[in-house]
Image (cartoon, grey):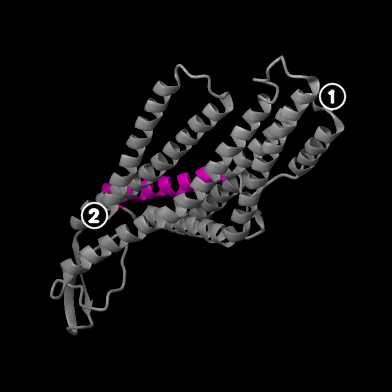
Amino acid sequence: MVWEQLFGFYVEVVFLVLLTLLGVGLQGDMNYNEVDDYREQTMFHTRLLCCTLYITLAVICLFANLVWYIADADNEFYEAFNPYLNKTSLYKKSAFEIYLPFDTSNDGYIWLAFFIQYYSKLISVQMFIPFEILLTSFIIHLISQTMVVAEAFKHIHKHISPKQTAGRKFLIIEMRIIKCINELQEIYSAFNLVDAVCSVQMLIQYGCAILILCILCYMAPMLEKAGEIFGCVMFLIASLGEIFFFSYCSQTLTLELQKVAISIYGIQWETYPLKVQKHIKFLLKRLQKPAVLKAGKMFPIDLNFFNLILQKAYSFYTIINARQ
């Protein structure tokens, strides 16, 4: 199932690349709108980035699981009391021990327990990745759409025939501004929907990521084999990378919305008719309020929050290392 998902994403990436190359070839001799071309290119790179992000995180987790599989397969046996047979039996060491309702000793189903432990970790990680990437991809798409709107404001005065009268020119500009306002309203509606629906999910997501960091910090001093240490480092990189990337995307969305206001100030809207100025004042008033995603309606998600997580994880590691 995992390989089928990866193959499907690779096929989508190749298909998008072919479509883009074909589109560039067809549009080479045509007089097309610069904003529409910018929109197509930006959304293509957005889809490509989301696919690459999913594939990269999936490959890292698969590789870490493979390293842990090799390390667990070479682990030594140890003696312990077997409650099923009421005697001492040999058990195989594992980096992550899980409870199984049958005899996992050498006298029982030791290899069955070994494969269940491995595939349970693999399946849990691969099921968790799509939920992680879904929200991040949604934010990336909102960033791209916001960039398109900011670019559209830079082209408000362009591609207007000089033969048009002054009233006709302002009418075209007004229509373009209203279109940009409608797109921004859709972006804010999607943003508010994400903040309302996924606020608790983001809190749980960050809580689980912090828990994983604490567990890895707790396990790090106890690992002895190079394979286990390498697998732990890979999961640590994947966990920190996921937290950083989502925090970075959330902060970037906030900054891109502020750049829209800067683009509006650069079009000299004070010289427009009063009707057009009302639309722009309404838009600027909306942009004055920063759009910030919050985990659990309490914690703003940005790079400062990521730094706070790093500080807490390092403090936890220092306390555990000092006690050991």
Q: Residue furthest right?
A: 274
| Residue labelled with disc 2 | 69
Q: Residue furthest bottom?
A: 86
* Residue closer to the observer: 311 or 303: 303
From this view, report whether residue 105 is shown above or below residue 4: below
Q: Which residues are magenta?
A: 224-247
In the picture, measured across the screen, residue 3 lies left or right of residue 212, that is left
| Residue 39 seen by the camera | yes
At label 2, which amino acid type do we have? Tyr
In the picture, measured across the screen, residue 243 lies left or right of residue 125, that is right
Q: Position of residue 142 (x, y in %)?
A: 57, 43
Alpha carbon distance from label 1 to label 2: 69 Å
Q: Which mark is residue 81?
A: none
From this view, report whether residue 61 is shown above or below residue 166: below
| Residue 225 seen by the camera | no
* Residue closer to the observer: 5 or 95: 5
At label 1, which amino acid type do we have? Thr
Residue that appears at 62% across and 50% down: 191
Neighbour tally class for label 2: few under 14, some 14-19, many 20 plus, Cα within 10 Å: many
Q: Position of residue 324 (x, y in %)?
A: 43, 58
Q: Residue furthest left?
A: 107
| Residue labelled with disc 1 | 271
Residue that appears at 39% across and 21% down: 25
Q: Quadrant of residue 35?
A: top right
In the picture, measured across the screen, residue 217 lies left or right of residue 191, that is left
Q: Position of residue 110 (x, y in %)?
A: 17, 69
Q: Earlier in the sequence, mark 1 or mark 2?
A: 2
Q: Position of residue 190 (x, y in %)?
A: 61, 50
